[in-house]
Amino acid sequence: MAARFGSFREFYPYYLGEHSDATCRRLHFAGTSLAVLQWLAAAVAGEPWLLLSGLVTGYAFAWSGHFFFEKNRPATFTHPVYSLVGDFAMARDILAGRIRW
């Protein structure tokens, strides 16, 4: 049974615990970065298929990190919105130096 969280603030420590492997974090960061670049390209080029492509790219990198390195189930399956916000929060914290790259 999935844990329940009343807020993202409660969820984020759990999310970080599910990303203790450095390679998994790196794959998440790469996937999130590539997704953002594709979404920006979609806006600039007016190519809506890049929106879907970015989503697929982001999740492919992130889920690979979970299945092959972290050996756990992605939080996306039980907490999709918090998990997506967590990807961006973790990327922010990596860039800020609060989480080891």
Image (cartoon, grey):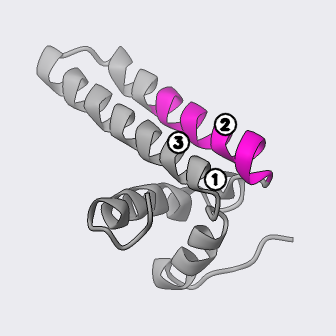
Q: Which residues are magenta?
A: 55-71
Q: In the rendered image, which residue does mark 2 sit on?
A: 64
Asked if the magenta segment contains residue 65, the reply would be yes
Quadrant of the snapshot with the C terminus: bottom left
Q: Is residue 57 magenta?
A: yes
Mark closest to the chain's N terminus, 2 or 3: 3
Q: Amino acid at mark 1?
A: Thr
Secondary structure under the numbered disc 2 in the rendered image:
helix
Relative vertical location of residue 61 with respect to residue 7 in this rendering, above or below: above
Question: Which residue is disc 3 drawn over?
Answer: 27
Q: Nearer the viewer, residue 93 or 36?
A: 93
Q: Secondary structure at mark 1?
A: helix
Q: Quadrant of residue 80?
A: bottom right
The main secondary structure of the magenta stretch is helix
> What element does badge 3 sit on?
helix
Residue 76, label in figure: 1
Q: Residue at x 57, y 85 (%)?
A: 6
